[in-house]
Image: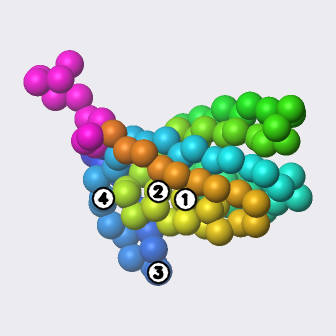
Amino acid sequence: MPSGMAVFVSAGKEATLETRIGAISILVEEPESAEALNAVLHEYAACILGRMGIPYREKGVNIICVAVDAPTDVINAMTGKIGRLPGISAKAIYSRGSGARTADNQ
């Protein structure tokens, strides 16, 4: 399978979809929501490349950045679930393409 493609199974159907590299920025202002946030991140663990968290104690905010490689719809679904949690804001940004290396961008 070429780089930038992945097989996803939904409702028992398998599909090969183009993936994109992205980052989800998350601001946690209510620590009580951390358990629910971790549950969502665990649900999407197969798409997560890594994550970094910075506690900003003086302001009472935790800043988290999650690097992902997944179809746009999957990244949007994850970001939406995270952003609907109480006291949590989330925003996704995407690479311009799939991240696949070609002769033009190596």
Categorize mark 3 by other alpha carbons within 10 Å: few (<14), some (14-19), many (20+).
Answer: few
- Point out the tag, 2 or 3, that comes first from the N-terminus: 3
- For label 4, the SS is strand
Q: Nearer the viewer, mark 1 or mark 4?
A: 1
Q: Nearer the viewer, mark 1 or mark 3?
A: 1
Amino acid type of the residue tagged 4 in the rendering: Leu
For the residues labelled 2 and 3, the Cα–Cα distance comes to 18 Å
Residue at x 37% of width, y 56% of height = 71
Q: Which residues are magenta?
A: 96-106
For the residues labelled 2 and 4, the Cα–Cα distance comes to 13 Å
Residue at x 40% of width, y 64% of height = 73
For the residues labelled 4 and 3, the Cα–Cα distance comes to 15 Å
Amino acid type of the residue tagged 1 in the rendering: Thr
For the residues labelled 1 and 3, the Cα–Cα distance comes to 21 Å
- For label 2, the SS is helix
- Point out the tag, 2 or 4, that comes first from the N-terminus: 4
Q: Residue 17 — which label?
A: 4
Residue at x 83% of width, y 55% of height = 30
Going by the picture, which residue comes out furthest to the front? 59
Residue 41 visible? The answer is yes
Residue at which label 3 appears: 11
- Point out the tag, 1 or 4, that comes first from the N-terminus: 4
- For label 3, the SS is loop
Residue at x 37% of width, y 44% of height = 94
Q: Are marks 1 and 2 in contact (CB under 8 Å)?
A: yes
Categorize mark 1 by other alpha carbons within 10 Å: few (<14), some (14-19), many (20+).
Answer: many
In this picture, residue 27 sits left or right of residue 30: left
Amino acid type of the residue tagged 3 in the rendering: Ala
Q: Nearer the viewer, mark 1 or mark 2?
A: 1
Residue at which label 2 appears: 75
- Point out the tag, 1 or 3, that comes first from the N-terminus: 3
Residue at which label 1 appears: 79
